[in-house]
Amino acid sequence: MTDTNTDAIEAAAFRRLLQHLDERKDVQNIDLMNLAGFCRNCLSKWYAAAAEDLGEPVDYDTARERIYGMPYSEWKEKYQKESSPEALAAFNANKP
């Protein structure tokens, strides 16, 4: 497989991940953190870092808008729910 094909496949898989997360707005970031150890904000940081590595600076807010599909403040207002005490306890217990 060529590097170009590998990049195209990985980009398509990333776009599919973003589509999946967009379709599952009911899944809260704390749920993702507790189950997988990363969340939409982590993806935003990774996106900004990858852009920086390629000489294309992307600030954190722009990266979050790409990952969330809208400004973070809008997503938070529309979709973010209060975390349950159990979810917070699990998050705090699993911090590195």
Image (cartoon, rainbow, N blue to C red):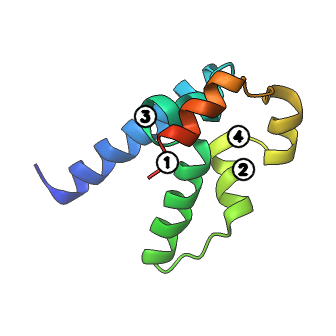
Q: Are marks 3 and 2 in contact (CB under 8 Å)?
A: no
Q: Position of residue 30 (x, y in %)?
A: 62, 34
Give the number of the mark in front: 3 or 2: 3
Q: Are marks 4 and 2 in contact (CB under 8 Å)?
A: yes
Going by the image, does 54 lie left or right of 89? left
Q: Alpha-carbon distance for marks 3 and 2?
A: 21 Å
Q: Alpha-carbon distance for marks 2 and 1?
A: 26 Å
Q: Which residue is mark 2?
A: 65
Q: Alpha-carbon distance for marks 4 and 2?
A: 5 Å
Q: Which residue is mark 1?
A: 95
Amino acid type, label 1: Lys
Amino acid type, label 2: Glu
Query: Tag 2, which secondary structure?
Result: helix
Q: Which residue is mark 3?
A: 36
User: Image height check: is 91 above or below 85?
Assistant: below
Q: Name which of mark 2 and mark 1 comes first in the sequence.
A: 2
Pick the front one: 8 or 92: 92
Q: Residues within 10 Å of mark 2 (few under 14, many from 20)?
A: some
User: Image height check: is 46 above or below 88?
Assistant: below
